[in-house]
Image (cartoon, helix red, strand yellow):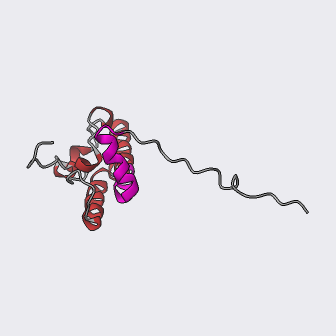
């Protein structure tokens, strides 16, 4: 992104047509989805406000009376917004996302099964 360019916030688009955009052909990065600059330091309150604004536009309940295609698109956008929020809301996941966006793949840490580290005692 060029210096001085603002991301295209999803929530600045026409909310009535938002869910009709196919997620698979127009997936924005997580930051631009919420209209945020792609950087590690985020204002948590601004992220929450942006998330709620996007969800208010794409929540599947808004499209309950719409056709099947619009309902499916709304569900996809709402899912994308949930996933993006979860990643950006976590400093560790946000850092990993930024690294991966800049071509530095990270191996995901897989926590061992919760019982695999228990010691077994015999009586």
- Closer to us: 36 or 26: 36
Q: Is residue 64 visible?
A: no
- Residue 56 within the magenta-colored segment of the rendering: no
16 left or right, relative to 62: left
Is 25 left, or right, of 71 in this rendering? left
Measured as percent of width and height from the top left, residue 40 is found at 28, 56
Q: Quadrant of residue 21?
A: top left
Rendered image quadrant of residue 122: bottom right
Q: Residue at x 26, y 63 (%)?
A: 49
* Span highlighted in magenta in the image: 82-104
Which quadrant holds the N terminus? top left
Residue 51 visible at all? yes
Q: Residue furthest right?
A: 123
Where in the figure is residue 123, as x and y percent of width and height?
91, 63
Residue farthest to the top, as pictured: 25
Q: How many numbered markers are drawn?
A: 0
Closer to the camera in the image, 31 or 57: 31
Residue at 25% across, 48% down: 33
Q: Residue at x 38, y 37 (%)?
A: 68
Residue furthest to the left in view is: 4
The front one of 104 and 79 is 104
Look at the picture and state if 94 lies above or below 105.
below
Residue 10, percent across and down? Answer: 22, 48
The secondary structure that most of the magenta stretch takes on is: helix
Residue 32 position, x and y percent, is: 22, 48
User: Is residue 90 in the magenta section?
Assistant: yes
């Amino acid at each position: 992104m060029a210096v001085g360019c603002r991301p295209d916030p999803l929530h600045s688009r026409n909310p009535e047509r938002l869910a009709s955009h196919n997620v698979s052909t127009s997936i924005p990065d997580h930051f631009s989805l919420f209209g945020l600059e792609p950087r590690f330091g985020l204002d948590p309150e601004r992220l929450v406000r942006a998330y709620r604004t996007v969800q208010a536009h794409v929540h599947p309940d808004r499209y309950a009376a719409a056709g099947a295609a619009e309902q499916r698109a709304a569900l996809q956008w709402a899912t994308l917004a949930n996933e993006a929020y979860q990643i950006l809301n976590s400093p560790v996941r946000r850092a990993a996302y930024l690294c991966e966006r800049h071509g530095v793949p990270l191996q995901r840490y897989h926590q061992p099964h919760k019982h695999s580290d228990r010691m077994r005692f015999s009586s």
